[in-house]
Amino acid sequence: MTDCHENGGCREDKIQSMYEYLDGALSPADIEDICAHLNECELCAREYDLECLIRSSVKRSCSEPAPEELKQSILAKIDVLRDSPDTSAHDHTGLGQHEENRRPMAS
């Protein structure tokens, strides 16, 4: 297995093709090309494996239901916000907060 990153890295089109392959958006000829590249380039193969792991983790995380107590806590906070006459107290941008409670701005 070769390492094409030794000479400055893979061409951007190969990396883009890898993502398109994972998304199922390549033609059969392009699939053959990227599979051959992944078999030859160790770093791209590792990048591919990492991307597969990330996608699998995201997919699994999105399919697990939230705990019931979390749902109830969120709904209770929404009710409090909805019933509050002073919405500026709940301004998460920091614009409606008193000066001493504002988050510092990055300079």
Image (spheres, rainbow, N blue to C red):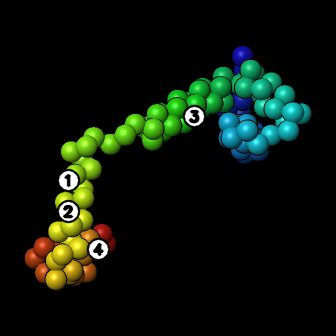
Q: Is residue 62 above or below residue 98?
A: above
For the point 46% across and 34% down, the residue is 60
How far apart marks 1 and 4 lie (CA) works out to: 22 Å
Counting from the top left corner in percent of width and height, residue 97 is at: 17, 79
User: Disc 2 on helix, strand or loop?
Assistant: helix
Counting from the top left corner in percent of width and height, residue 23 is at: 69, 41
Mark 4 — residue? 93
Q: Earlier in the sequence, mark 1 or mark 3?
A: 3
Q: Amino acid at mark 1?
A: Ser
User: Disc 4 on helix, strand or loop?
Assistant: loop
The image quadrant of residue 12 is top right
The residue nearer to you, when weighing 101 against 74, is 74
Q: Amino acid at mark 3?
A: Glu
Mark 2 — residue? 77
Q: Residues within 10 Å of mark 1 (few under 14, many from 20)?
A: few
Tell whether label 2 touches label 1 (CB within 8 Å). yes
Q: Amino acid at mark 4?
A: Thr
Does any portion of residue 94 appear in the rendered image? no
Counting from the top left corner in percent of width and height, residue 79 is at: 21, 67
Counting from the top left corner in percent of width and height, residue 96 is at: 21, 81
Q: Earlier in the sequence, mark 2 or mark 3?
A: 3
Mark 1 — residue? 73
For the point 72% across and 29% down, the residue is 4
